Image (cartoon, rainbow, N blue to C red):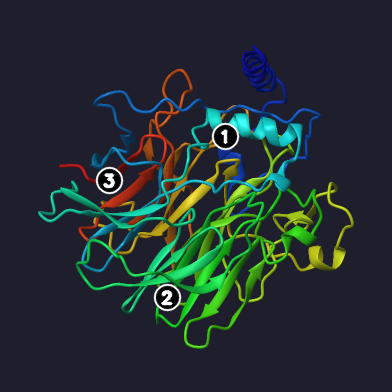
Amino acid sequence: MPILRIMAAAGLALAALSACGEMATLPVEAGMGPTPQLPAPNPTTVPTVKTAKAVGWPPGAHPIPASGLAVTAFADGLDHPRWLYVLPNGDVLVAETNAPPKPESASGGLKDWVAGLVMKRAGARTLSANRITLLRDADHDGIAETRSVLLEGLNSPFGMALVGDWLYVANADAVVRYPYRAGQTRIDAPGEKVADLPAGINHHWTKNLIASPDGGKLYVSVGSNSNVAENGMEIEEGRAAIWEIDLASGARRLYATGLRNPVGMAWAPDGKTLWTAVNERDELGSDLVPDYMTSVRDGGFYGWPYSYFGQHVDTRVTPQRPDLVARAIVPDYALGPHTASLGLAWSGGARLPAPYTDGMFVGQHGSWNRNPRSGYKVIFVPFSQGRPDGPARDVLTGFLNESGEAQGRPVGVAIDRQGGLLVADDVGNAIWRVGAAP
């Protein structure tokens, strides 16, 4: 009986929270682009909670592609696929993963308990498979005929990168590397630790990585340990940042800071400019704060936790740092409030029709702190001369059904060797492939 009462209370609490809070006064599009609208903050005693219950795809259903595009299932029946990496021979690596267990000391009381309910409802509280699966489309028909477990027994793996004969993997607590030869379908050799990463509480657990174009360095993204430093800055040491690791010497340094939760990373066509997609803070109302993508400056500071989108001060943070706020860089392009923009891929190599030929694809995992919901789709931001130029366009929608339930949630995006766009769907447990319509 006590367990039943607890479960009933949990359901009532979640229902009550879902009915509370405020509503957006602006459309999502108002919070997009290089100069988004940033209204006054509207915090509430009870945060706005509007999750989409994870239900999965009914038989035969799939996301809806934009005009001129077609979508097929590249692979299905996976276990919470989050991130993608395409090897030079065309094999596709999928990180089947989820958050690691939190230490008992990380319990934050009622707020964390409610957050756990929200995540469970959204399909984000499954046990991590802790593996990387290899998918192979040998006949190039857009469907993976074979799959094999390349690596297993990992610790919430996420980012992957091949440099020479080494496959680098970003676990929740460290970057490790494994020997790799072209065409290999399983790696049994033990991993070698390259660098420790901030771990522990892991409020944001995903650790992504990308190699520099010359293969000499790795860039590793590490999210914050809180929403807005409510537990103090001591636990944020080395977090909300992108690290640079020199592979020859092992030296590492903070490349950019003040990035609340940077996840996706991609190189612009010049091979010199790193871009990242960043999830901004919650609980300032449905219209704030827009997630964004931005070019990353060496040594740049992007505001978190003291300010957002430049010098817009977050008064919840104490003590303040006006010296840091004064030099906070304004991001290049807002992606809408609470869209949970995670995936990021440059269009180079894609064989999609115009207007999807020059720009960034963005996987928007979807909101929990906005009413009405935002995200839950893949978009394309057009570029011109290496910079965002124009409004974003929908690429893949339909992840929410008519009842507002999540049939799928897009995460990682990547371009395959045949020029199609691959999308990892961690609720639909599938990899979707977007190509030109026949």
Name the quadrant of the C terminus. top left
Which circle marks residue 119 in the picture?
Answer: 1
Identified by mark 2, the residue type is Asp
Residue 184, percent from left and from top: 22, 66
Which residue is denoted by mark 3 in the rendering? 434
Write the residue at 70% across / 37% down.
Answer: 112
Residue 23 relative to residue 350: left or right = right
Q: Quadrant of residue 322?
A: bottom right
Single out the mark in the foreground, 1 or 2. 1
Q: Nearer the viewer, mark 2 or mark 3?
A: 3
Question: Are dots 2 and 3 in contact, CB under 8 Å?
Answer: no
Q: Residue furthest right?
A: 319
- The mark found on residue 270 in the picture is 2
**Residue at the bottom extreme, as displayed:** 249
Task: Find the distance from the CA under tag 2 to the CA under tag 3.
Answer: 25 Å
The N terminus - image quarter: top right
Q: Are marks 1 and 2 in contact (CB under 8 Å)?
A: no
Residue 297 in which image quadrant: bottom right
Give the crowd class for mark 1: few <14, some 14-19, many >=20 residues within 10 Å: some
Question: Residue placed at 37% from the left, 46% from the top?
Answer: 424
Q: How many marks?
A: 3
Residue 386 shows up from this direction: no
Q: Earlier in the sequence, mark 2 or mark 3?
A: 2
Going by the picture, which residue comes out furthest to the left? Answer: 139
Please tell me how crowded label 3 is: few (under 14), some (14-19), or many (20+) other residues with Cα within 10 Å.
Answer: many
In percent of width and height, residue 125 lies at: 52, 36
Of pointers 3 and 1, the one earlier in the residue sequence: 1
Q: Residue at x 44, y 57 (%)?
A: 154
On screen, residue 129 versus residue 278, left or right, reads left
